[in-house]
Image (cartoon, rainbow, N blue to C red):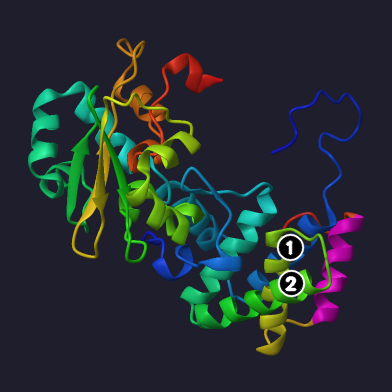
Amino acid sequence: MSGTHDDHGHHHHEPESLLSLRVRALESLLVEKKLVASEAVDRIVSAYEEDIGPHNGAKVVARAWIDPGYRERLLADGTAAIEELGFGGVDLQVVENTPGVHNLVVCTLCSCYPHALIGLPPVWYKSFEYRSRAVREPRVVLREFGVDLPESTEIRIWDSSAELRYLVLPERPAGAERLSEPELAKLVTRDAMIGVAVVQPPAAAAR
Amino acid sequence: MEPVPSREVADMTGAVALPRKNGELVFDEAWQGRIFGMTVAMSHEACFEWREFQAQLIAEIAHAERDGESTSYYERWLHAFERLLADKGLLDAGALAQRTRDFESGRRDDVF
């Protein structure tokens, strides 16, 4: 959003774009006709902005990082463990990255994806290219995503289905020891929970 | 009652897929969120079926691509929404043009 500039003149903002004016005019007409309520629009926009995204998955990961008991329950029974945090509606298995093992999630048949936890799937997740190459040459695919794993690291591929979805529990980055749970959650990206990225240390993430 | 994101909306694929980043919706400007919200709200109120809007958006995008227009995703969305409302007899093009001028001239400043 704009509006961060210093402006001592009469106008506090950039001139409003014609599109913005037109949308305001449209809303005003529709409200007048009682076809829409502005409060309903507010609620919908914030619901989509807040509920759609990797926030829920990131909370799960951050909790697992700080609470070893939770981590154990999460790896043993993902479905039950996410319900503890109020998330559900999906049968989930959580797979943990370790120094020797990296996990990668794909859905070779269609595009099964844990929406409730990590939001909208990226376009490439549904592409034929990713679905086939993630299985055939995961190391190359990961390198293209910027994850260069040593040859000694084992890569495990998890093929999602309508019945069971997978979520990667990434490794906690170095330098994040003093962060609070919400601060940790902010470091966790959608891509890290699919397995095509690693969680960056706080300094790198802030850049 | 809080609205729950509908899969029908969130899972649109192909050319009509919602712009996103890190799994989140991206609204570059506030009006984009407003037009998105209005469209979803009116489909909730059964003013139209979501698939009707989606078909209109697909047509609008195809049309814009064919003509080589450099319009943004939500600008095309706005056109599709206006067209759908006009087809349904819910919006008068003249009234919208007049109301837009009212806002532009400052004669009106609030949507209420």
Q: Which one is nearer the viewer's eye here, B56 or B107?
A: B56
Q: Is residue A145 visible?
A: no
State the residue position of label 2.
B79
Q: Looking at this view, is A83 or A160 the one in front? A: A160
**Image-based side of A162 in relation to A68, left or right:** right
Magenta span contains residue A200: no
Q: CA distance from mark 2 to mark 1?
A: 6 Å
**In terms of depth relative to the viewer, which is nearer, A16 or A10?**
A16
Callouts 2 and 1 on one subunit: yes
> Residue B3: x, y in percent?
40, 62
Q: Secondary structure at mark 1?
A: helix
State which region is magenta. Answer: B93-105
- x 37%, y 36%: residue: A192
Q: Quadrant of residue A200?
A: top left
Q: Quadrant of residue A150?
A: top left
Is B95 covered by the magenta stretch? yes
Q: Amino acid at mark 1?
A: Glu
Q: Nearer the viewer, residue A59 or A145?
A: A145
Name the chain letter of the residue that bears numbered label 1. Answer: B
Q: Quadrant of the N terminus of chain A?
A: top right
Q: Main secondary structure of the magenta part?
A: helix
Q: Position of residue B106 (x, y in %)?
A: 88, 54
- The residue tagged 1 is B75
Q: Residue at x 45, y 61 (%)?
A: A128
Mark 2, secondary structure of its residue: helix
Mark 2 residue type: His
Dots 2, 1 in contact, CB < 8 A:
yes
Res. A11 image quadrant: top right
Question: Horizontally, is B68 left or right of B33 in the view?
Answer: right
Q: Residues within 10 Å of mark 1 (few under 14, many from 20)?
A: some
Q: Please state the horizontal and vertical placement of residue A146, each as a whole percent of the image.
A: 48, 31
Tell how many labels.
2
